[in-house]
Image (tube, helix red, strand yellow):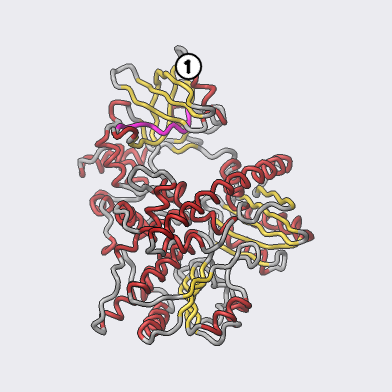
Amino acid sequence: MTNRAFLNVEASATGRRWVGPGTEQDRLAEAMAQVTHLPLALCHTLVKRGVAPGEAAAYLAPSLRDLLPDPLSLRDMGKAAARFVQAVKARQRIAVFADYDVDGGASAALLLVWLRAMGQGATLYIPDRIDEGYGPNAPAMAALAAAHDVIICVDCGTLSHEPIAAAKAADVLVLDHHLGAETLPPALAVVNPNRQDEDGSLGHLCAASVVFLLLVEANRQLRAEGTPGPDLMAMLDLVALATVADVAPLLGVNRAFVRQGLRVMARRERIGLKALADVARMDQAPTPYALGFLLGPRINAGGRIGAADLGARLLATDDPHEAAALAERLDVLNTERREIEAAVRASALAQAEARGFDGPLVWAAGEGWHPGVVGIVAARLKEGANRPAVVIGFDGDEGKGSGRSVSGVDLGAAIQRLASEGLIGRGGGHKMAAGLSLSRAQLEPAMERLGALLAKQGAGQGGPADLRIDGLLMPGAATMALVEQLEAAGPYGAASPAPRFAFADQAVSARRMGESHLRLSFSDGLGARLEAVAFGAFDGPLGPMLENPGAARFHLAGRLEINSYGGRNKVQLRLEDAARA
């Protein structure tokens, strides 16, 4: 028997069924509140994350000291760190080969900043997305090997057998997190929590976290010889940025990385991030939202449509003038990227709609679609359809595509399966995101097979996603103190969404902001009023429903946040959905 919808909302303004906490979660939350004296709303959030009453205090104050895994628990880590330290001590020539996204750029910057603190430089090489594609290629690796003693591949390399074989004149270290195949490339060391012979317990780490663990082990080896290493805690802003931008789940040590990294970033000591925050007009303390939606897209813009190394150079620089110039350039490129993305998104959406959204996979392909934006467009299709999505841009007979998945469906493994079956040229990635290349003749058979593989994992079995509600609040209970306590259960992001609360039977007053946004206030009639904002409300049904409410009353659902506009802090609701009461 299906449980009754929360507040009896079977179909909200956005067409979703509201699902609230079950009776067992209610019981556990109430028991935790009695034991810990924490607010019930916070206890619901903790119970949902599997936190027991005795673990609540530690969960609310995650310690990197307690949560940091032993670097040597990863295969090949000891070998990789020893070779890295040897190269530093002998002043050997080091090259860093990085992916062109935020994770790759942050990973490269970690190494470059650490090496600079040790009085040593390194060559940075980031392949061009269009001319070279993702990951190491044989000509580049051979050229680097001829001029360097050690090549460190970050956020790439696990599947690069031939390119790494071409670098036989140098020792190659791979620091990656993408899904590994049954055989590893001929590198001196492949450190990757998603190797097939790892237990998967650290599979949620991004590449920058793997690089950070290498530096922890390198510092440990140096310390054993009486040599102090650079301050690693000051580098956690880069790890936090990569973790959020790469949509790594904010679980376990990732929570501590991001929590501590945000504190480091708030000090504004990294010249490149300070310059980028200024051009992005970030006037508040950094949050996961700012990392994911303000800083991340700008750093990515270089790899998407500009010079591939701009982001890594910005993150690594110690020159204020260079930082300002790079940040300005990335900001301009990000604006251009948005324009290109909008055109591709419109074409892809029309094609996907014509094909239909009722299957296990949503996909679109077009001539001349810029390979730098297909991943973003795939993410938009995925969000709209609640299904895995793949978008492919063709240049003649060659297509390069990117996919995004939904929770519980491993897209990377499915695309890697296509490559092993010869249905595409290349492909791989991780659970939530993957890339592929294929010919026009391969397109239809590959997408049909991919849909079948994803269907076996349960993709496409539902309509619009249910709206998960964490609890019921009254406007008077939404205080600054409660929001600050809820923030302690964060940071929130991938696999750990911010709690969502419903407010029942509210009288609403609303006004339109600009073309598509809505600002409103609401009350349950018991005195307290709460402000709310709904961005993009008039791009869908939410704005028209609430703009002229009259005497109607509504159930409202969203996430609480602190609005610091004008230097004054007050609680507001980021409204996500509504239904007539």
User: Where 279 sits versus 123, above or below?
Assistant: above
Q: Quadrant of the C terminus?
A: top left
User: Where 581 sits versus 51, above or below?
Assistant: above
The part of the image, by quadrant, that contains residue 226 is: bottom left
Q: Is residue 314 magenta?
A: no
User: Where 197 sits versus 477, above or below?
Assistant: below
For residue 74, side relative to residue 516 (left or right): left
Q: Residues within 10 Å of mark 1 (few under 14, many from 20)?
A: some
Q: How many marks?
A: 1
- Residue annotated with mark 1: 549
Q: Is residue 205 shown to the viewer in this render? A: yes
The part of the image, by quadrant, that contains residue 417 is: bottom right
Q: Is residue 201 shown to the viewer in this render? A: no
The x, y position of residue 142, in whole percent, is: 59, 81
The x, y position of residue 532, in whole percent, is: 40, 28
Q: Residue at 41%, 56% (x, y): give it.
A: 241
395 or 444: which is nearer to us?
Answer: 395
Q: Secondary structure at mark 1?
A: loop
Residue at the outermost right position: 441
98 or 251: which is nearer to us?
Answer: 98
The x, y position of residue 443, in whole percent, is: 74, 57
Which portion, as a residue range, is magenta? 570-578
The x, y position of residue 163, in whole percent, is: 60, 77
571 or 325: which is nearer to us?
Answer: 325
Q: Is residue 572 magenta?
A: yes
Q: Residue at 61%, 74% (x, y): give it.
A: 137
For residue 525, side relative to residue 440 (left or right): left
Residue at the outermost top position: 551
Q: Amino acid at mark 1?
A: Pro
